[in-house]
Amino acid sequence: MSLARRFGAAVTARTVTAVVRAVLEEHAPGGQQRWLRTNHRGEPVSMLEGPAVAAGLVAGAVLAAPSARAAGAVGIATAAGAAFGIVDDLAEDLDDRRKGLRGHLGALAHGRVTTGGLKVLGIGAGALLAAAIATPRTAADGSRRGLLGWGTDVALSGALIASTANLVNLLDLRPGRALKATSIAALPLSVASGPGGVAAAATIGAAAAAADQDLAETDMLGDGGANALGAALGSALVLSAPRPVRLAALAAAVGLTAASEKVSFTAVIEATPVLRDIDRWGRRPVHAPAPSA
């Protein structure tokens, strides 16, 4: 796959993200107030970054995709992450104290569908469909794969896309953190061989467009943007990484998600000098006031 195609994906994603964010500044669905939330400093921050990033991701990854299979897989996974994440952002019951994957799955087990539970189901379904599209029925030697082997690969790849989408959302607790993490993870995929390189490059491009406002703490990804980024990254892995790497990535994503139920990612990052320095790079100091308008 040509370097020009990957570069085009990154440029397209960055451009579309910036343009859509500018348009949303003037024409926010439901008005600007609907998209405002309070961040960790107690300051207002806009979630309009989320749909802008999602639009950039889909445009870059789909328009520059090397095949219809790659375009369909990344487009469906990313759109599902964005759509169901935005539903959770805008319609979440703030009085419902259920948090985390375990809380929402517990609610589903008792017959209660929260917006978080709907997000789990929707992103999971989108991830499985994307994995089915991304996983060929024909083996490398030209023979047709058995249904069991193909279905197992689809299930594992779907789980990887969904768990990566969720993990990136869990990281989106401080300015720039999720954008930095996905960009670092996407970088080797963007230069490696395989059809997932375009999706990885689009991830970097969209993250670059959103970085300034995210680090300035005027914008945030929200579930819509974070889930979209994670789904695009997971799709890139599914399309390009060999099975052992996909299994290792799935184990890491599931393990970190399980750990998040007991351990604060922020506390671990603050206690680890290298991670702390990366996390704080480009951000306002902890006690610095917001710049005046």
Image (cartoon, rainbow, N blue to C red):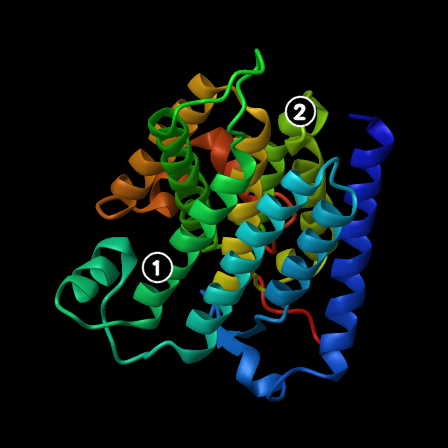
Instruction: Locate the N terminus and report the quarter of the image it occupies.
Output: top right
- Residue drawn at (62%, 34%) of the image: 186
At label 1, the amino acid type is: Leu
Q: Up-down: is 137 above or below 79? A: above
Instruction: Locate the C terminus and report the quarter of the image it occupies.
Output: bottom right
Residue at numbered disc 2: 194
* SS of the residue under disc 2: loop
Instruction: Compare residues 75 and 92 and report the one nearer the observer.
Output: 75
Q: Is residue 85 visible?
A: yes
x%, y% of residue 54? 63, 59
282 with respect to 275 (left or right): right
In the rendered image, which quarter is residue 122 located in?
bottom left
* Numbered circle sitting on residue 79: none
Instruction: Compare residues 85 and 274 and report the one nearer the observer.
Output: 85
In the rendered image, which quarter is residue 218 located in?
bottom right
Q: Earlier in the sequence, mark 1 or mark 2?
A: 1
At label 2, the amino acid type is: Gly
Residue at numbered disc 1: 121
Q: Residue furthest front?
A: 144
Q: Up-down: is 244 above or below 74? A: above
